């Protein structure tokens, strides 16, 4: 198996573009240990910056749920097209749970009737994609055509009318964004069915990034419309950072477990492009860090992060080949090298307590390892549940990190 070292061109999330802009607009790059007045003395405006208000929480939650929907849907599709029925069923259940979680949020704001209507529309579009996938697998053009017809002439107008009517967003805007969700998702499904795995990995990242374009305006409109329920600012640059970090960290987890799943199943044709996508995700994170703390910090981050990806590859390879030495070495590298190195790097850069960071990083390793172990043992329902749990854990790293960075570098976010 190859180490994750080949970058690919991708469409970046809006938050990542913002972070890159931070680097271009800064006249002096701050290192992780920089204590200059520019990085440690907040201005009056920056001092008031809050990124964990209820409005910011809402935007973050909607983003993560929408992106999770996309990633879990593609995991289910990939399993279906690969004939892995138990895995398809397990991720189908997670996909339904994700949908009811979004529906619950809708119900919290707009009431039980709106929740029921949302659940019906959302569930139907999941079923339409299942029908389309089945049509591709069976080369049944009638099924494919029927599914596309329902997605385009039923789901898109129904969902757009519901969201626009509830939030006050222009129907044309919601329709355009929803249509793009359908077309970008369909592109990934078509790529997998055609075994165009390089393109599938690239299109997967583009489809995942697009979910923010739908999530942001929906969440921001709800927060503005119901400021009593969601007080605070959902749009400031600090919240942009929080959303960008959380999105990228969640994407990292799902790309990693997709890659390990393919490696353990012997799907080398899919594993290699997913490894490249995982590397590109890490490069985006490194660019974000470099944009805030300087190029040396970005380089240091990339080296540590890339090494932990390679350590998981070694561990996965050991499981696939029953090589206990490789398994033990992978775990040793992760626990005795990666965890202390990365924890110290994050603590020094952000000012977060080292013990707290170490605990969170350790939990990332243990939750990810749990997914890989379940995949290797072919415990599909357990693997899917562990996958979602590990994905959700990434927010526990992203949220405090973003808050600490904004507090340490307020001038960059004012």
Image: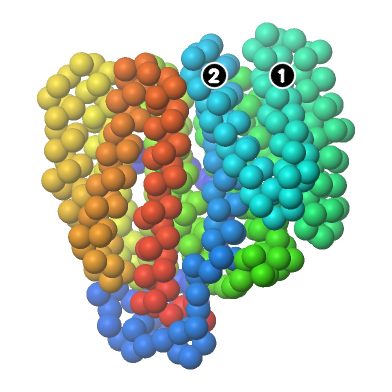
- Which of the pair 230/312 is nearer the observer? 230
Q: Residue 405 is drawn in which quadrant? A: bottom left
Mark 2 surroundings: few (<14), some (14-19) or many (≥20) residues within 10 A = some
Mark 1 surroundings: few (<14), some (14-19) or many (≥20) residues within 10 A = some
- The residue at 55%/26% (across/down) is 93
Give coordinates of residue 142: x percent, y percent.
81, 13
Give coordinates of residue 125: x percent, y percent.
73, 31
Identity of the residue furthest to the front in this view: 112
Please state which of the two labelled residues, at mark 1 or mark 2, is closer to the viewer. 2
The answer to whether residue 321 shows anywhere in this view is yes
In the rendered structure, the answer to whether residue 14 lies left or right of residue 412 reads right
Give coordinates of residue 135: x percent, y percent.
71, 14
Q: Is residue 402 above or below residue 264?
A: below
**Helix, strand, or loop for circle 1?**
helix
- Which of the pair 145/225 is nearer the observer? 225
Give coordinates of residue 51: x percent, y percent.
50, 70
Give me the C-alpha separation between circle 1 and circle 2. Answer: 14 Å
Identify the residue under disc 2.
89
Which label belongs to residue 131?
A: 1
- The residue at 41%/39% (across/down) is 389
In the rendered structure, the answer to whether residue 52 lies left or right of residue 401 reads right
- The residue at 45%/36% (across/down) is 388
The answer to whether residue 182 shows anywhere in this view is no
For the N terminus, the image quarter is top left
């Amino acid at each position: 198996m190859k180490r994750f070292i080949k970058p690919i061109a991708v469409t970046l999330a809006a938050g990542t573009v913002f972070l890159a802009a931070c680097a271009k607009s800064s006249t002096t790059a701050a290192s992780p240990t920089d204590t200059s007045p520019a990085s440690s003395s907040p201005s009056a405006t920056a001092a008031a910056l809050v990124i964990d208000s209820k409005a910011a929480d809402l935007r973050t939650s909607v983003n993560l749920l929408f992106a999770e929907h996309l990633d879990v849907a593609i995991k289910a599709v990939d399993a279906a097209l690969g004939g892995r029925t138990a895995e398809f069923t397990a991720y189908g259940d997670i996909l339904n749970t994700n949908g009811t979680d979004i529906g619950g949020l809708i119900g919290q704001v707009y009431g039980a009737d709106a929740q029921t209507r949302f659940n019906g529309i959302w569930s139907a579009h999941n079923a339409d994609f299942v029908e389309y996938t089945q049509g591709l697998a069976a080369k049944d053009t009638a099924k494919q055509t029927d599914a596309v017809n329902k997605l385009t002439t039923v789901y898109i107008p129904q969902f757009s009318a519901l969201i626009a009517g509830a939030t006050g967003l222009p129907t044309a805007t919601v329709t355009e964004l929803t249509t793009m969700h359908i077309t970008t998702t369909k592109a990934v499904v078509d790529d997998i069915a055609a075994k165009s795995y390089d393109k599938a990995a690239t299109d997967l990242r583009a489809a995942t990034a697009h979910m923010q374009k739908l999530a942001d305006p929906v969440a921001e409109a709800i927060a503005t419309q119901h400021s009593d329920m969601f007080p605070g600012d959902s749009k400031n640059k600090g919240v942009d950072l929080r959303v960008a970090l959380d999105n990228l960290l969640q994407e990292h987890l799902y790309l990693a477990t997709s890659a390990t799943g393919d490696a353990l199943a012997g799907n080398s044709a899919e594993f290699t492009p997913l490894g490249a996508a995982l590397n590109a995700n890490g490069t985006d994170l490194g660019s974000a860090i470099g944009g805030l703390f300087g190029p040396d910090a970005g380089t240091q981050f990339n080296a540590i992060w890339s090494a932990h990806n390679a350590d998981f590859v070694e561990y996965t390879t050991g499981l696939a080949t029953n090589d206990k030495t490789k398994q033990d070495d992978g775990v040793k590298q992760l626990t005795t090298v990666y965890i202390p190195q990365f924890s110290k790097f994050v603590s020094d850069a952000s000012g977060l307590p080292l013990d707290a960071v170490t605990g969170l990083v350790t939990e990332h390793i243990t939750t990810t390892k749990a997914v890989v172990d379940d995949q290797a043992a072919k415990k599909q329902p357990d693997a899917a549940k562990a996958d979602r749990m590990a994905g959700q854990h990434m927010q526990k790293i992203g949220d405090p990190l973003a808050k600490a960075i904004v507090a340490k570098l307020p001038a960059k976010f004012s």
